Amino acid sequence: MDFWPEFLATSWGREFVAGGFGGIAGIISGYPLDTLRIRQQQNSNSGSALSILRRVISAEGPGALYRGMGAPLASVTFQNAMAFQIYAILSRAFDSSVSVNDPPSYKGVALGGVGTGALQSLMLTPVELVKIRLQLQDKSHAKLHHIDCHKGPISVARSILRTEGLKGIYRGFSITVLRDAPSHGFYFWTYEYMREQLHPGCRKNGQESLRTMLIAGGLAGVASWVCCYPLDVIKTRLQAQTPSCPQKYNGILDCLSKSVKKEGYGVLWRGLGTAVARAFVVNGAIFSAYEIALRCLFNNGSVQTENTI
C-alpha cells in the first residue's frame, strides 16, 4: 500500500508518471489524423485525407477513425515514460562535461535522442504493427466477403503470434530503428533549441509559457517527421503485409524499389501533410502535458510556469 507514495517521492517516479500523461495526451489528440495517414500511405488510390475522412465516416462511422487506439493507449504510459527516462539519462551520458546543475548540451540532446529512438523501437514495433493492422481493416469489405474481423488489439496480436510466430510480431523492426533513431535526435534537439529561442533562459529555470511548450513541441514533431517520412511509408507497407495475402515486398530495399517504380518518388511523401498536421498537434500536447505534470508533481500540486497563451 505504501508503494505509490514512495514511487512518487522519487525523481524518476515523477518523471515516469509525467511521461505517461504526455503520451496519453498525444494519442488522444492525434489518433484520427494518424488513421488517415496510414490509409494514405498504404493505398495509392486512396485519395486525399479529406476524401478518405468522408469515405470512412460514411461507410464505417466515426468510430473507425479510432480503431486500433487500444494498443498504443494501453502501452503509451510505459512507452512514453521510458522514452523520457532513457533520454534524460543518455543526454547527459553522451556529454559528461556539462554540470548536473545545467541543462544538457545540444550535442548530448541530439545523441541522447538517437539512442532513445533506437531503444524505443524494441517496444514500439509490435504496438505499431497491431495498430496498423487494425487501422487498415475494412469492416464493410469483410462483411461483404464473410471475413472475420479482429475485435481489438489482443485479437490481432494473438492472430499474428499464431500464424507468424514471434518473428511476425517484430515485422518491420529494422525499418522502425532506421526511422526512429535519427528522428528522435531531431525531435529532442528541435524542442530544446526552439524552447530556448522562444523563451531565453527557460532551459535552466524551467519557467517557459504554455505557448512556448506548445510551439516548441509542435515544431519538434514536425522536424522529426519530415526527416524520416519516406522510411515511415516503407514501414507502413511492410507491416501491412499479412500471410493471408501474397507478399508484395521481400524487404526494405525491395519495397522501396517496387513502390518507386510503380508509383514514382512522390509515393515516399504521400500523406506528409496529414502527418505534419498531426505531429504539430500531438507533440505540442505531449510536451505540454509532460512539462506541466512534471512541475505539478515536483511542486506538490502547484504548477510553476507562465500559463499565458
Image: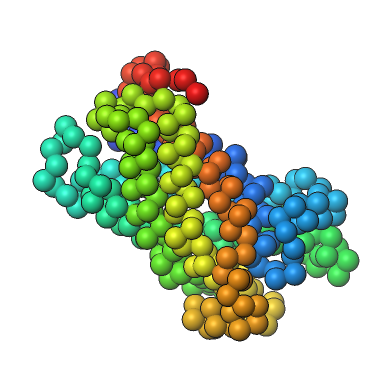
Image position of 39 with respect to 66: above or below:
below
Image position of 293 with respect to 246: above or below:
above
Residue visible at 37% across and 26% down in the picture: 208
Residue visible at 37% across and 60% down in the picture: 182
Residue visible at 70% across and 71% down in the picture: 44
Apparent side of residue 303 relative to residue 286 in the rendered image (left or right): left
Q: Position of residue 164 (x, y in %)?
A: 57, 74
**The N terminus is located in which quarter?**
top left
Q: Where is residue 10 in the image (x, y as percent from the top left)?
A: 28, 29
Asked whether residue 255 appears in the rendered view, the answer is no
Say how the picture is coloured. rainbow
Along the viewing direction, whichever of 222 and 131 lies nearer the viewer: 222
Image position of 11 with respect to 242: above or below:
above
Along the viewing direction, whichever of 221 and 177 lies nearer the viewer: 221
Along the viewing direction, whichever of 228 and 18 lies nearer the viewer: 228
Apparent side of residue 229 relative to residue 66 in the rendered image (left or right): left
